[in-house]
Amino acid sequence: MNTLINLIEYYWLIITLFLLAVIATLSLWPAEHLPQVPGSDKTHHFIAYGALMLPVALRKPKHWLWIALSFTVLSGAIELIQPYVNRYGEWLDMAANVAGLACGIVAAKIILHLKMVTLNNT
């Protein structure tokens, strides 16, 4: 488990930029061309933005909270742009995105705490 966490911390920027590109692409892709996937739309938003925030919150680069705020702003911008690309912008999507970002931060705090406990016990 620590090896995976260490890899995420080391490659946090590459992982974050990749996830950001995937999220932006899928969010702005015309709806009729998207594949059908199981689960709620809001759940997808929550998971995507939680995954986006996790590497940043694990690594905690300088000004990492500003990065989290920029993800929130980006989320709102995507919701505003979606009607122009044959999609539906919903503010509840943005709420799910922000909840996912918060969950990513909390998950990172828990993981880092468990990592410290494990290191102190060895």
Image: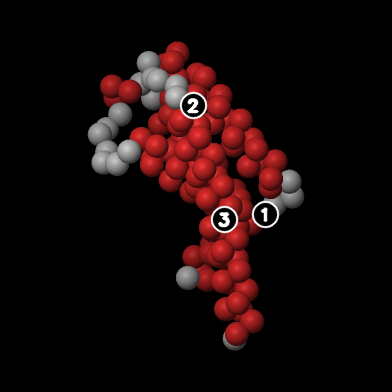
| Residue 43 as seen in the image, left or right of residue 122 | left
Labels 3 & 2 near each other (Cβ < 8 A): no
Secondary structure state at the residue bearing disc 1: loop
Q: Nearer the viewer, mark 3 or mark 1?
A: 3
| Residue 39 as seen in the image, left or right of residue 21 | left
Going by the numbered disc 2, the residue's amino acid type is: Trp
Q: Is residue 37 above or below residue 7?
A: above
Q: Is residue 74 above or below residue 2?
A: above
Residue underneath mark 3: 106
Q: Position of residue 70 (x, y in %)?
A: 64, 35
Q: Residue furthest top?
A: 84
Labels 3 & 1 near each other (Cβ < 8 A): no
Going by the numbered disc 1, the residue's amino acid type is: Lys
Labels 2 & 1 near each other (Cβ < 8 A): no
> Image point 45% across, 24% down: which residue?
90
- Quarter-of-image position of residue 68: top right
Residue underneath mark 2: 91
Q: Nearer the viewer, mark 2 or mark 1?
A: 2
Going by the numbered disc 3, the residue's amino acid type is: Val
Q: Residues under labels 3 and 2: Cα distance?
A: 23 Å
Q: Residues within 10 Å of mark 3 (few under 14, many from 20)?
A: some
> Image point 69% across, 45% down: which residue?
65
Q: Is residue 110 above or below residue 87?
A: below
Q: Nearer the viewer, residue 119 or 104?
A: 104
Q: Is residue 1 visible?
A: yes
Secondary structure state at the residue bearing disc 2: helix
Q: Residues within 10 Å of mark 1 (few under 14, many from 20)?
A: some
Residue underneath mark 1: 60
Q: Nearer the viewer, residue 8 or 100?
A: 100
> Image point 69% across, 47% down: which residue?
64
Q: Position of residue 102 (x, y in %)?
A: 56, 47
